[in-house]
Amino acid sequence: MYGLIGKNLSHSFSKEIHNAFGNQNYELINTDNIKSIVDSKAYNGFNITIPYKSEIVKYLDHLDDIAKLTNSVNTVILKENQYYGYNTDYYGFIELIKFYQIDIYKKNVLILGNGSVSNTVVLALEALEANKIIRLSRTIKNDNDDSFSNFDKYKNFDIIINTTPVGMYPHNDDDLLINLNNFKKLEVAIDLIYNPLRTKFLIEAERNNIKAINGLYMLVMQAKKAHELYFNCDLPINLANKIYKKLLNKMYNIVLIGLPLSGKSKYAKLFEMNLSKKMYDTDVEIEKVINTSIFDYFHLHSEAEFRMIESEIIKILYKEHNCIISTGGGAIKVDKNIDLLKQNGIIVFLNKNPEEIASKNIQGRPLIKNKDDVLKIAKERLPLYEKACDISIAITRDTVYHINEIKEKIDEYLNY
């Protein structure tokens, strides 16, 4: 048997990844007592995650060179009644850098956190010949560490890497550790977290036009190396890349935004059938809560009250994976809504001509009584849609054409 040892593993993807590599005897092992797992010797091998990557070291008989230098182990094998510890995170991180073609040579790198994972990242950066490496943390451990409060001293750095669990599911909404606004030279922001796909840190990086990369590829590649150690084999890189893309496709949401009557619900239903993603319509979810139609609700309540309920629905949905989410036309008016939906979602703007929408016989829309209302709403909201979206689609042709167009643009976006 094999498995992953850690805490709060219910949303881990490790079992799925190792199964895909061919190991069907892999399970998730939640424990508060790692020593009991070690003493049982019930597993041929296991992976280690938070919070045990350093604690496990004292129970092992042998360490590979990387594990010795980092005091961090994430792969253990039982051979001839002795435990061998390896650090495959190192390999995973190097492969992440290669995959995204990130130039480390002579760059100044700022690392958030100084725990066991940061030790691995530092060692890899040194091997890639980074110029200067500084770690920010709450507790200073060595000369290359500094306090989070001093982040402004490093605003000329080129790369920032988050190695802390801040912003990781289920604590997606944790406060940012630093403010990225003053980092004018920053080229890349890497967050080793992969759930959510875009942490608040990465969303903030994108807002500042900084390339943002999550840790999902590293997760798959460290698992590849662990599998190779378990079974003394070599796995083709193409297999690992295929598993990565399959996992990514199962994780991301498609979030549709746009004017009322732009076709969001129609496209969402079609995507649900085509992509096997679960559909949510925020207006439908709202009506389940208010127990009446949205049109009738507006007879007794204000738009502000409605937006509060809408935001609460989005707070429930944004942590989900593998969904199609059709939003109400005005959800874009609350910045927080989009920030949340971006965490696991690709925001697709269905940009339909307001004049075409206004020409329809519109009924049952509480904020639209006539053509002028459509044009007024469009003037207010179109810049907000453009600002928020990852992909903009001009709705000018038939539905089948645009479904294929959206798929292609999502593929391009993910490959980038």
Image (cartoon, helix red, strand yellow):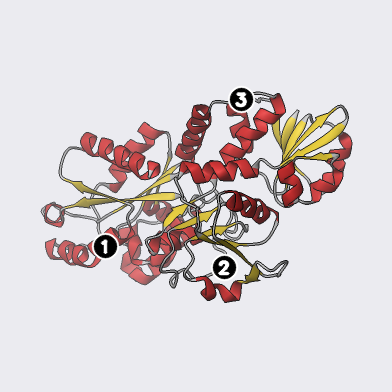
The foreground one among 352 and 108 is: 108
The residue to which callout 2 is attached is 177
Q: Position of residue 384 (x, y in %)?
A: 28, 63
How far apart are the two marked residues, 1 and 3, measured between alpha carbons?
61 Å
How far apart are the two marked residues, 3 and 2, measured between alpha carbons?
39 Å
- Taking the image as shown, residue 116 lies to the left or right of residue 357, namely right
Where, by quadrant of the figure, is residue 151 drawn?
Answer: bottom right
Using a 10 Å C-alpha cutoff, classify the residue at mark 3 as few (fewer than 14 neighbours), some (14 to 19) or many (20 or more): few
- Secondary structure state at the residue bearing disc 3: loop
The residue to which callout 1 is attached is 366
Front: mark 1 or 3: 3
The residue to which callout 3 is attached is 234
Q: Which numbered disc flags the more N-terminal residue, 1 or 3?
A: 3
Q: Is residue 82 above or below residue 307?
A: above
Determine the residue positioned at 81% across, 31% down.
78
- Secondary structure state at the residue bearing disc 2: loop
What residue type is disc 3 on? Asp
Badge 1 vs badge 3, beta-carbon distance below 8 Å: no
Determine the residue positioned at 48% across, 53% down.
198
Q: Position of residue 306 (x, y in %)?
A: 38, 65
